[in-house]
Image (tube, rainbow, N blue to C red):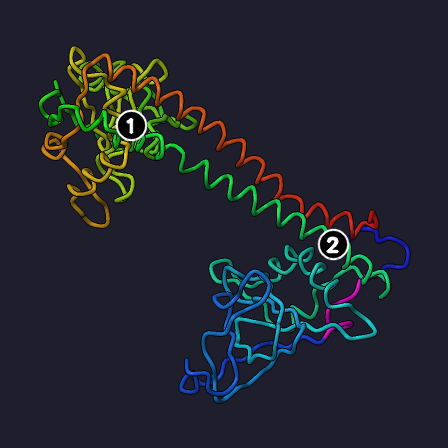
Amino acid sequence: MQTLPNGWRWVKLSEVCEVVMGQSPEGVSYNAEGKGEPLLNGPTEFGEMFPTAVQWTTSPTRFCQVGDILLCVRGATTGRKNLADRRYCIGRGLAAIRGQPRQAHTEFLSFALDLATEQILKEAAGSTFPNIPGAKLERVEIPLPPLSEQKRLAGILKEQMAVVERARRSAGAQLQAAEVLPAAHLRAVFNSPEAERWERKRLGEILLDVRNGVYKPEGYYGRGTRMLRMFNIGRCDGRWNLVNMDSVELTSAEQQVYCLEVGDVLVNRVNSRELVGKCAVVDESTEGAVYESKNMRVRLRKDIVFPQFVAIWLNSFDGRQQVLDRLKQIVGQATINRSDLDSLELPFPPLCDQRRIAAQLSSQMSSAERLRQRLAEQLDAINKLPPALLRRAFNGAL
């Protein structure tokens, strides 16, 4: 247990708070017409700070009061909080925590509970459906300074957390904007007046070969030739994810049949609906690898088509939509096959324009990805600020 600043002490919640565990009313008393008392059953009614009732009960059981801390005590959301803006009937998924006026300042308790979330989760019984009974919640220990210090720290933390929240919203909005940039760049090309003048061809007209990947029993993996699996193809962004690559033992004949060459397009043919059809072009980083049976290799006529252009189009909205229109659902997974690919109709500008467009979009996509990564890191850093501020406050550094 950490050493506390002078004048602070460790206390159990039950020593300085009233803890009211929720109790669900009879189901027949529920209604959506506003009859009786507003009812909260869990986080589905929670907002950013205050809850919003969507149902009522004519047989209320347990109540929270205005200003109480509402704490989720069941399920995956155990530890999530809101503040009661009025009296509510609370169901068994919630507890109301109320500081004793001369012992604990409720706003300070809210921050202390944030700090104690890890302890609360440890107290939660069960891993698949965690919950924290009232007796265990009352035994949770928090560091408590004198009441005047509680109020001072609560004021400082409230102001600091508001600044952090504004920064988080701003960074989140910027990240959302960056995440849609690639789609905007693709629309600017494929929905342009120039694109309307392009010839259109079926993919089958420009294919040399399509082959499904190799299947091997489990004992053949972990050694031999590098293998690309479906998760090695990025999420419809034309990139490779090579952090984890498998290997497989093959005969020389099998290696020759399934070996990937620079310019091949590897397409995911079996996956969840939103990921079937994702693809990437084989380059120096993946040349010489083989590929699993859930992918298929597309080899194109490079004298008339630029592979990167085809991959970019397949990952565009129009390409994705055509793939989705052809999917077949089998035992919870979606699939496409050679005939589906053959029927895809893509824009077909001259080869020189394909190269120019692919280079332009590749540069734009790389810039967008760098921006997305930078903003994601910024948001991650902001999300780490609240715990850091709490640690400072409870170490006596504020």
Picture coordinates of residue 236, whole percent (x, y): 32, 34
Q: Which residues are magenta?
A: 9-17
**In this orientation, which residue lies closer to the viewer: 226 or 319?**
319
In primary-sequence order, the first of circles 1 and 2 is: 2
- Compared across the picture, whether 322 is left or right of 316 comes to left
Residue 132, position as x, y percentages in the image: 58, 67
Residue 99's place in the image compared with 381, above or below, is below
Q: Residue visible at 21% across and 35% down?
A: 269
Q: CA distance from mark 1 to mark 2?
A: 49 Å
Q: Is residue 332 above or below residue 215?
A: below
Residue 233, placed above or below residue 55: above
Q: Residues within 10 Å of mark 2 (few under 14, many from 20)?
A: many
Q: Amino acid at mark 1?
A: Val
- Label 2 sits on residue: 157
Task: Indicate yes or no whether the magenta region holds residue 13.
Answer: yes
Residue labelled with disc 1: 189
Residue 274, position as x, y percentages in the image: 29, 43
Taking the spot 18% from the left edge, 13% from the top edge, the residue there is 302
